[in-house]
Amino acid sequence: MAATSVVVLDRGNNTTCTINLHGATVVSWRVNNQEQLFVSKQAKFDGKEPIRGGIPFVFPQFGPWPFGPQHGFARITRWNLEKAPERLQSGDVEAIFSLMDSDFSRSSWNYQFRLTYRLILREKELHFNIAVYNPSKELTFSFNMLLHTYFKVPDVRRCQITGLQGCTFVDKTRDGSIYQEARDVVTINEWTDRIYQNTSQEHIITNVVSGRKMRIQKYNFPDTVVWNPWLDRAKDMSDFGDDEYPNMVCVESGHVSSPVILLPENQKEAFFDKNTCEPELIDALKDIPKNYANQIIDLVKQQHVEQNLNHLKKSENLIDFSSFNEEANEITPSFMESSATPNQKLRRRSTFSMSPSQSLYYSLTSDNKLGVLQKKNGYCGCHRELFPPKNDSLKKEWAASVIGAHVKRFLTRRLLKTEKVQALVATVKGVLVCAVELHCSLCLSHCIF
Ligand SMILES: O=P(O)(O)OC[C@H]1O[C@@H](O)[C@H](O)[C@@H](O)[C@@H]1O
């Protein structure tokens, strides 16, 4: 039966990671042939029950739930192998799994979603990167997520866990009462079931017997669940041996105390005003979630407005150029004489500055006697009749500035098409996509040292 088919990442040197497609459950992680994960001898691999051990994937619910199975449906659903194991240049091995909504998922949680689960097997590290997408156009959803890692230990009573000091925790063994952890290292000597909140980004599990250490590093997983059923509860579980509890400790990284809320716009598709944005920007933004794309577009729009305002301000000065008084070396706007107050004239004169290239972004319309500058289909042009040159040298100067500006624009367009600039654009785009992905994904790594 395909329900328990597995995918193996093999890094060489007896370093492997095995993922069962049932729940995308990591069922083995061996480093130099040493198993790091606990899987019960009683675990069921029937493609129905969750696998007792390894790293079950808890989504979209942590704990019991009126609508569906405990800890959600992801750990009991068959996942897709999105990308078969592939060796990276570093020698590490990567595979990607995915899960989408189905009739089964919608029967308990009626939302469209898409999960990608990327695993990278490094020399002594197992790295996870998870992304959740909400492809809906109108529905927001919220969820919990947790990687329910069962670490294999020689004796749980001799283990120490750091990174919990000062954190509040919900103690499920004491009716969900809330306490604060005072210890700098937490040890386990009884049934333990705690949800620690806002924990450190790093935990170290020291196995006192062997001195071996496991480092957990997490990003966007604010909570840490510490669980061991101990003897009595072990006896109640059909898929867990009575004597197995000393050999495991669950230190589970998750987002469970508060829900993660995913807005419908968080889809990887962007819709925006094509008139406001450059085609290159539109292209770059297609790869990032709509809400981020919209924020970037808003910024660009704002910049456009500011730039236009600046140009309009400059345009007032440009108009002044129309009646340049050579002798006085100052400007007297002939067609504004009647409407402008002396103060306005003074202000315009005193702020005069003119750059031909700026002037060419706009075209002055001759019917607009107040000289409001208008952008013409993004193309620049000047109405020569509004700039009657007084003499030959001024004519030449003006012609030179017009030609100079056109040449600049021509060269800029050519420059933008060069391979180097295109490569820069691609890099900027890549960085943008990477930054956004980092922002909306969850990362976890387990590393032995
Ligand atoms: O038996 P399950 O559904 O795999 O859950 C195991 C344990 O998982 C832990 O994460 C929970 O905090 C415990 O309350 C729960 O008992």
Image (cartoon, helix red, strand yellow):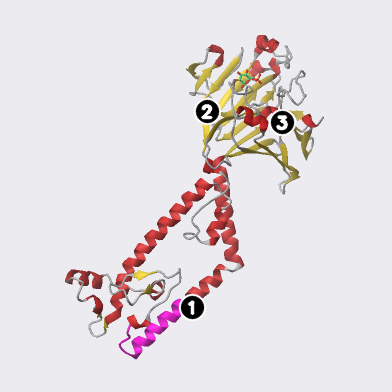
Residue type at numbered disc 3: Val
Taking depth in this image into account, of 69 and 184 the one nearest to the observer is: 69
Residue 331 in view (yes/no)? no
User: What residue is drawn where x is 59% and y is 63%?
Assistant: 422
Image-based side of 13 in relation to 133, left or right: right
Q: Which residues are magenta?
A: 387-406
Of tags 3 and 2, the one toward the viewer is 3
Q: Is mark 2 within 8 Å of ligand 1?
A: no
The N terminus lies in quadrant: top right
Q: Sequence order check: which comes first, mark 1 or mark 2?
A: 2
Q: Is residue 231 visible?
A: yes
- Is residue 405 highlighted in magenta? yes
Considering the whole magenta stretch, tell me its main secondary structure. Answer: helix
Tell me, yes or no, whether the highlighted magenta stretch contains residue 448.
no
Question: What's the amino acid at mark 2?
Answer: Thr
Precedes in sequence: disc 1 or disc 3: 3
Q: Are marks 1 and 2 in contact (CB under 8 Å)?
A: no
Distance from disc 3 to disc 2, alpha carbons, whole Å, reads 24 Å
Name which residue lies at 35% across and 90% down.
392
Q: Which mark is residue 26?
A: 3
Residue ID at (65%, 15%): 229
The circle on residue 407 is 1
The amino acid type, in three-letter code, at marker 1 is: Val
Residue 200 place in picture, x, y as percent: 53, 30
Q: Which residue is mark 2?
A: 199
